[in-house]
Amino acid sequence: MPRLTNQEMQERIAELQARNDALQAQLDASTVPPGATGSDTAAIARKPRGWAWTLLATVLIVIGAILAPVAVVANWAKAELADTDTFVATFAPLAKDPSVQEFVSAQVVGAIDQQVDIRSLTSDVFDGIISLGLSDRAATALKALEGPTADGIKGLVSNVVSGFVSSKQFAAVWEQALRTTHEQLIATMQNDKNAAISLGQNGDIGIQLGPIIAEVKSVLVKQGVTFAKAIPTIDKTIVVAQSDAVGRVQSVYQLTIAVGDWLQWVALAFLIAGVLVARRRSLALLWAAVGLAIGMIVLAIGLAVGRAVTVATLSPSVMPAGTARDLYNQVVEFIQSAAVAVAVLAIAVAVIGWMAGPFRVPRRLRAVAGSGAASLRAVGERHRLTSGRAGQWLYRQRVLVRTLIAVAGAAVVLFTRPLTPGLIIWTAVVCVVLVAILEVLQRPPASAPAFDLRT
């Protein structure tokens, strides 16, 4: 009998392993033959689970897949409501958004203009000067300057407001107002008028301008614009969004706090239970991952639709479309990133589950991968390059090492923000390369089967 090469031996082992899996599947699906004794019964056949287990697994997986996107939103809401740093981190960057700065500047200038009649004040000043006894010609010339002076003062106010709103000082005032508001979270949810973010009875969501106008008044006075002292305390709120759901959000506030922490684990428990009770766990794992990915994709699509609806339904007289879009994007950024991250991980699990499953194509791919790794090890050994005892240890601990690689890759995707397509692709590539290197470095026994993700 001719001596088999290492590659041929690996291919033969892979073929025998595939036949063994097929025979085992047939035995598992068959009934116990008549006359079989106890040990034969345990080794040869088990009674397969009925269709009810498949139905139960399907129900559990569907419930888990439905709860998963709800859990992401609940976790986000709980973090925003209960964690001051998270709340501030979400809304504070809006102070540096150009469209938001432009909108706030226009609102502040409008509020000051409504409270202080600059043209009337200018006219009173000019009339007082004329009353000092100027000639008719001088009085006429001075009167002609009244309009441009008023316009100039308005321009000065606008420039001061714009400069302040685009400054670091405004960002600090904005952030402090948010932090103070969140520390009084319960009061905010109960429509405390002193909160930076207010919730109106008709569904209006607004930002208080009082602290901002007070700072603008101080800046104007310091620059010598004495009329700014006449600016009163202004209680004005910018309506940044309107939704009939605001009342419902307030009513379920306590429920959100309660379920935000554990709903994600409930969803995961349903998915795991669905896989464990299934008749074919490898197939159930595949469908659980696919269902989870679909749930996250639906959530991401829902956010995109919500953005379009928000921008379309919000009146331009309330807020420009660009500002509304930026505000919406900032608020839902965490949900969107979490949905994408979980969807990517679910797709990765689905691919791994398919590759590790008893399907024809994955078996061939595993056999090819194992043969390739064996060939590389053989080439190294011919050149006296071997991993020795370290390779033997890697083979014994291959499941642990692969799990650590998978966990590290999952951590990168879950906790890195912003999550970009490039980061996802490179993380996947690095993980695959590390697994391939592990397969080459490990030294399996001569009788070990070819590369198998299940081991």
Image (spheres, rainbow, N blue to C red):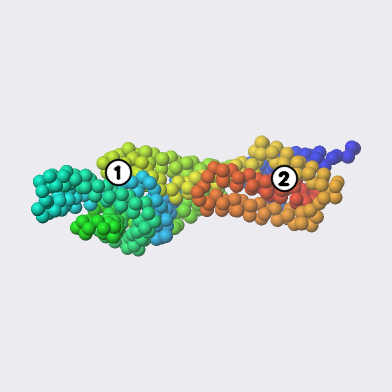
Q: CA distance from mark 1 to mark 2?
A: 60 Å
Q: Nearer the viewer, residue 186 or 196?
A: 196
Residue holding disc 1: 319
**Which residue is at 31% across, 49% downward?**
159
- Residue 179 shown left or right of residue 18 in the figure: left
Q: Nearer the viewer, residue 454 or 426?
A: 426
**Which residue is at 64% across, 42% downward?**
355
Q: Nearer the viewer, residue 71 or 42?
A: 71
Viewer-side label of 1, 2: 1
Q: Could you classify mark 1 by the number of other residues whose Cα lies within 10 Å: few (under 14), some (14-19), or many (20 or more)?
A: many
Q: Position of residue 97 (x, y in %)?
A: 39, 48
Q: Is residue 62 visible?
A: no
Type of residue at label 1? Answer: Met
- Residue 263 shown left or right of residue 43 in the figure: left
- Residue 455 shown left or right of residue 190 in the figure: right
Type of residue at label 2? Answer: Phe
| Callout 2: SS | loop
Q: Position of residue 294 (x, y in %)?
A: 49, 41
- Residue 329, compared with residue 169, is above or below; it is above
- Residue 183 shown left or right of residue 436 in the figure: left
Residue holding disc 2: 451
Q: Position of residue 245 (x, y in %)?
A: 30, 47
Q: Could you classify mark 2 by the number of other residues whose Cα lies within 10 Å: few (under 14), some (14-19), or many (20 or more)?
A: many
Mark closest to the chain's N terminus, 1 or 2: 1
